[in-house]
Image (spheres, helix red, strand yellow):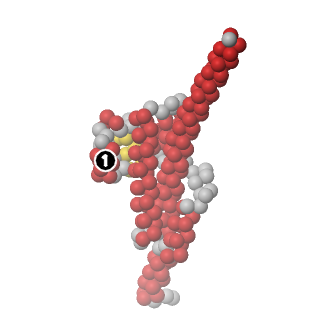
């Protein structure tokens, strides 16, 4: 029959084994930056936004509350991220305002990703807390990738349109030159 002291030792050793070791911490943080980690990960439905950071970013970019997306609930400090990404991905064309929304959101999400990554690196976390934080960080990384891809695709489409228009203008000029030569 185990003594009271042995039970306390066993309980404390179970508690210690439940916390992340430095090696596990390094592996978790490194795996966040593996190329295929985020495949199959969905953006989070909602994320909490630090309103102090948001106000600071708004001041730097000279934005007002009217410039914020409707998916941001300032009173709660919550952003309906999945709905925002869905709206932006399905937009045929992005207005300058929407492009600025994406850029601002990328900055905010990048800050949140760095904060959570620092927590993974240094905070005393249980395995369960670390898994939860890891999944949250994966979701944020996936959201960042989706937003950057969306911004890049919209720009590529615009770039492609510009090139097509340029080619058509050049073609018309060549035809006009050709017609002038024939008429002489």
Between 73 and 117, the residue placed more toward the observer is: 117
Between 118 and 164, the residue placed more toward the observer is: 164
How many residues crowd around disc 1 within 10 Å: few (fewer than 14), some, or many (20 or more)? few
Q: Is residue 158 left or right of residue 79?
A: right
Q: Residue furthest front?
A: 184
Q: Quadrant of the C terminus?
A: top right
Q: Quadrant of residue 102?
A: top left
Q: Quadrant of residue 64?
A: top left
Q: Taking 166 as reference, is 84 above or below it?
A: below
Q: Residue furthest top?
A: 183
The residue depicted at 59 percent of the width and 28 percent of the height is: 166
Give the residue pinned by disc 1: 60
Between 90 and 169, the residue placed more toward the observer is: 169
Residue 43 visible in the current orientation: no
Expressed as whole percent of the image width and height from the top left, the position of residue 168 reads 62, 24
Between 143 and 7, the residue placed more toward the observer is: 143
């Amino acid at each position: 029959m185990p003594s009271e002291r042995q039970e306390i030792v066993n309980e404390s050793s179970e508690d210690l084994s439940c916390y992340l070791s430095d090696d596990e911490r390094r592996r978790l943080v490194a795996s966040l930056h593996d190329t295929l980690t985020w495949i199959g990960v969905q953006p989070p439905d909602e994320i909490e936004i630090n309103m102090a950071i948001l106000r600071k970013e708004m001041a730097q970019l000279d934005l007002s509350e009217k410039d914020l997306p409707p998916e941001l609930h300032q009173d709660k400090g919550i952003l309906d991220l999945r709905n925002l990404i869905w709206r932006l991905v399905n937009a045929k064309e992005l207005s300058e305002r929407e492009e600025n929304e994406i850029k601002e959101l990328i900055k905010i999400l990048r800050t949140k990703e760095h904060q959570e990554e620092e927590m993974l690196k240094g905070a005393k976390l249980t395995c369960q807390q670390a898994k939860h934080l890891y999944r949250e960080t994966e979701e944020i990384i996936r959201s960042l990738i989706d937003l950057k891809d969306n911004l890049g695709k919209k720009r590529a489409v615009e770039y492609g349109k510009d090139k097509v228009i340029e080619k058509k203008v050049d073609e018309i000029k060549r035809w006009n030159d050709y017609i002038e030569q024939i008429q002489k």
